[in-house]
Image (cartoon, rainbow, N blue to C red):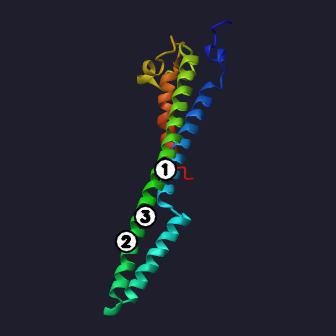
Amino acid sequence: MEGENPIEDRGFLAAPLTFFLVVVFQLLSKWLDQLQKKGSSNNNNTKEAELRSEIKQLLREATALSQPATFAQAAKLRRSAATKEKELSLYVEQHNKDINLSYDLYGNVLIASKVVVYLILVFWFWRTPIAMIAKQLVQPFGRLLSWGTGGHLTGHVMVGIIPWLILSTRVSKYVCKFVDF
């Protein structure tokens, strides 16, 4: 009985659970990318809005002072508006840099955790088949799919962990194209 069904050694749910982990990582990656895109385009910051309104108000006041006698006061208001615009651009630049830095940190943590989980899966399932597929279904690719499993069963191809991770990643990327957050 020992060695009759090599998949039962590590559990018959290994392939679906591995696929589920890969899909979760892909969804998290896509969610983080969409948050970063929304965060850079969606700036509802009160300080930024306040500076923009001050600039508009200063420019309105400067255009209202169009008489030659009030030219100095209008020039002073325009210089003040230019200073506020520089302050606004510096604030927006710093704010965007901080946001991108935090998203980069989250992205790096996600990539590192993905690498660690994939390495754990590879070490755990090395030389152990993760799934069994009929040989007729994968006729030209049987040897490629069984890489890292250590053998074949009559009429079936044993799928190794590395080909399964590659296949799961490609399928989950395709599936994630149709998911919106």
Kind of residue sitting beneath label 1: Asp
* Residue 16 seen in the figure: yes
Q: Percent from the top left, x then y, of residue 56?
A: 44, 77
Decide which of tag 2 and tag 1 comes sooner along the chain: 2
Tell me which label, 2 or 3, sits earlier in the chain.
2
Query: 10 Å neighbourhood of mark 2: few (<14), some, or many (≥20)?
Result: some
Vertical placement of residue 6 versus 134, above or below = above
Q: Position of residue 130 (x, y in %)?
A: 57, 21
Q: CA distance from mark 1 to mark 3?
A: 16 Å
- Foreground pick, 44 / 169: 44
Q: Secondary structure at mark 1?
A: helix
User: Label 3 belongs to which residue?
Assistant: 87
Name the spot of residue 149 as percent of width and height, x first: 52, 14
Q: CA distance from mark 2 to mark 1?
A: 24 Å
**Disc 2 to disc 3, C-alpha distance:** 9 Å
Determine crowd level at label 1: few under 14, some 14-19, many 20+ residues with C-alpha closer than 10 A. Answer: few
SS under mark 2:
helix
Q: Earlier in the sequence, mark 1 or mark 3?
A: 3
Depth check, mark 2 against mark 1: the one in front is 2
What amino acid is at disc 2?
Answer: Ala
Quadrant containing the N terminus is top right
State the residue in front, 181 or 46: 46
Q: Is residue 3 above or below residue 48?
A: above
For the point 48% across and 45% down, the residue is 101
The numbered mark at residue 98 is 1
* Secondary element type, mark 3: helix
The residue depicted at 46 percent of the width and 17 percent of the height is 147
Q: On the image, numbered disc 2 is attached to which residue?
A: 82
